[in-house]
Amino acid sequence: MEKLHTGNSEAAEAGASFQQSIGFQSVWARSLRLWYLFILVPASTLFLGYLYLRYYVPTYQVKSVIYIKESPEDQAVADITTGIQGNLVSSNSMNMSNQIEILGSYAIMKSVVDSANLEIEYVVKGNIRNDELYHPSERPFDVVEYEKGPDNKLYNRELIVSLADDGNSFTLRSGDEFETSGKLGEKLFLPYGSITLDAVPDNSSFKNEVTVTIHDPVLTARKYSSNLLISTVNKSELLELSMMNPVPDRAIDIINGVISRYDQMTITEKNEVARKTTNFVNDRLNYLGQELDEVEAAAESYVIANDIVGGTARELEGYFTRIQENDKALANLQIELVAVDQIRQSVEQETGDSLRYIPYSLSVNNLSLTPLIDQYNQLLVEQDKLLLSARPNNPVLISVEDKIRELRNVMLTAISKARSEIEGSIRELTRKNEKLFQEIRTIPSKERGLMAIERQQEIREQLYLFLLQRREESALSSAAAISNIRVLEEPMLHQSTSFGPIQVYGLSLILGIILPFGIAAATEVLDNTVKSAAQIKEFTSVPFLGQIMDNKGTEQVVISKDTRSASAEMFRMLRTNLQFLMQGGTNRVIMVTSSMSGEGKTYICCNLGAALAISGNRVLLVGMDMRKPKLASYLNPNWDQNNKGVSNYLTSNATLDEIIHPAESTDNLFYIGSGVIPPNPAELILLPRAKDMISQLREQFDYIIIDTPPVGLVADSLLLRDHVDISIFVARFGVTKIDQLQIIDDIKRNNKLPNPGLVLNGLKMGVGYGNSYGYGYGYGYGYGGYYS
């Protein structure tokens, strides 16, 4: 058992060493033998490249770059909030991630799909690939109207339309379900909806069938929205919009549509705020107009009732002038106080209504609430936009809501501070007026009453003029409203994501060249058979006697006195090398064996005997392979396996004279057949008659060459170790495994057979084998019945 493990370990080491010995030279030699792959594989890969170019629909990338400017209100809010609460609000209050969400929102994309009818697809089907008719100029008609019908059955259904020769009518069918006809410009009712087709001018000669497919607009918008990629450019405030599509013009139209819808949305928002401001100002103007009428009527009635003619004293006029200024300031403060209360009430109730309608700036000690109101309105608008396409747990929506709550707290703090300051100012002005009134109580009451009425009239006139100015400013803002978006790079085709013909054919050719090398390398790595004398010398210490070419002819004996072929010369060299193992010529009994069947040991045995015979020696070939005998049939094609031979002699059923036969092809060459196949060949070899037979034959012949069964399969060869002088092992090119050489090496190392030597048979010649002879040999041996 220990020896068995040792043998397995040595075989594994040999296999590992063999893998390491594989280099470029062996792979190159294998590649030369597989030369036909370098024609077939490139041709196949080039053909596959041709099919790819012919059938594959390329996709194209369209890009655009835009810049979203920050409005002055946004910058003002950033300055104010930074002063109030430090870094609570970012200096760039317009969050770019919000704008990315809005640009890529479903609402904007749905508007683009509806306006351009992107859910309708026109295709002309071909034998190789389909062509989409995206531009109206490419197709003979347009779908101008359709009704989806119940259960949306019209969607995703192929409608095949064929125009009639008159150019005004058409036939429409949907597979094998139905076929109908209609006229261009008229509604056609279908089993699952209706459709109206209108002719495209100058395309009436179009005769191909057009397949119309109407997709669900909602799903179409979501598909294009997911395909639209929006990202910042190098961490700047520039946004890049890109889209992949088989039709580049469609991607250009979609990106242009998204930019246009965003631009319209921004302008509409500004106009809406201006409209609300104008409406508020108009309401206040109507109210002040009524108050002015009342004050003027009261002044007229007072003058008539009190019969006042003439002016007031200079002193009285000075008092009233100061009181008038104070009253004007009080009126403004009262309006500011009402506005502050309205803002606070709206903020505390979280109604979400826009506060942009306040028609004037509110300033107390350089604290302006107007930018805060603008920022608050803008965040509410962004929240409404995000709610169109985002879920409640969307991170961007949550971020906007957090900013709204934070800004609300800032506004409440600022409002409380502003209200306290306004109330303090009102108390101070009221105290001043009371003091002035005490000073003028001595003035006649009639003139004093008239001046009070005039003072109220002047205050309301100034407020009226102020509101008129604000209304004009709001109207001008609405008329001059522009978008914050600027297109820096129009949508344009950048590149195709598909390979062009040069790339495809180049890659196909490179792959067609690399693959055969890969196949050759893989085959070489997986091939662990003996292919050279160098391998034999590397993996075993058994003396190497020579190599024999592969015999492709029908003759089994290829050497004679007059033969000068490469195979004959190799056998002559083998005969010469054999002399080194004979040690002075006393070792004359030679055993020929192999590690397994099919390695050509019988062929070597016959031709080695012939080589020795033509040199003047009497040579006897003994067929002791009594399991599948072939030796006699090689020398005599008419040999009958039932003829007497070794097995008959060993069982005392024949004499030596009866079983020795001369070889007709070569003088001095004789042979003994195996005889009748016995059931117990190993037991026969152990009989004393085997020893006696070899002893008698030594006296009659110069050389005795014994053909034995493979030593790697059965023990017959090992039983002859005491009867032979030299042991020749035959390995076959491309058949014998590298690890099988360890069997031979083990026999030598443990002295199981005397004087072992090794011969490489079946050597391949020609291109890719690294040998100088151009011959080959095909040979087979079957030992399937050894264990039966």
Image (cartoon, rainbow, N blue to C red):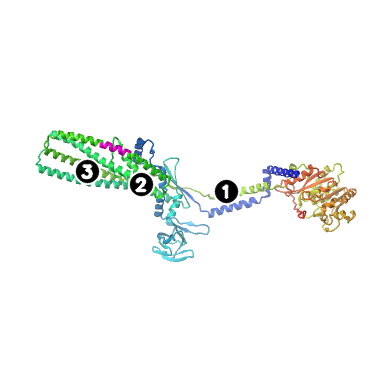
Of badges 1 and 2, nearer the viewer stands 2
In the rendered image, which residue does mark 1 sit on? Answer: 507
Q: Spatial distance from mark 1 to mark 2, Cα to Cα?
A: 50 Å
Q: Which residues are magenta?
A: 413-423
Q: Could you tell me what secondary structure mostly forms the magenta stretch? A: helix
Q: Given the image, on which type of amino acid does mark 1 rest?
A: Leu
Of badges 1 and 3, nearer the viewer stands 3
* Residue 449, x across and y down, in percent: 14, 39
For the residue pair 511 and 10, the one nearer the viewer reads as 10
For the residue pair 532 and 29, the one nearer the viewer reads as 532
For the residue pair 452 and 728, the one nearer the viewer reads as 452
User: How many circles with numbers are drawn on the protein?
Assistant: 3
In the rendered image, which residue does mark 3 sit on? Answer: 464
Q: Looking at the picture, does residue 160 appear above or below residue 521?
A: below
Q: Of helix, strand and loop, which one carries label 1?
A: helix
Q: Given the image, on which type of amino acid does mark 2 rest?
A: Thr
Q: Of helix, strand and loop, which one carries label 2?
A: helix
* Image mark for residue 727: none
Q: Spatial distance from mark 1 to mark 3, Cα to Cα?
A: 81 Å
Quarter of the image with the N terminus in it: top right
In the rendered image, which residue does mark 2 sit on? Answer: 266
* Residue 275, x across and y down, in percent: 29, 47
Residue in the image at 21% along x and 41% along y:
462
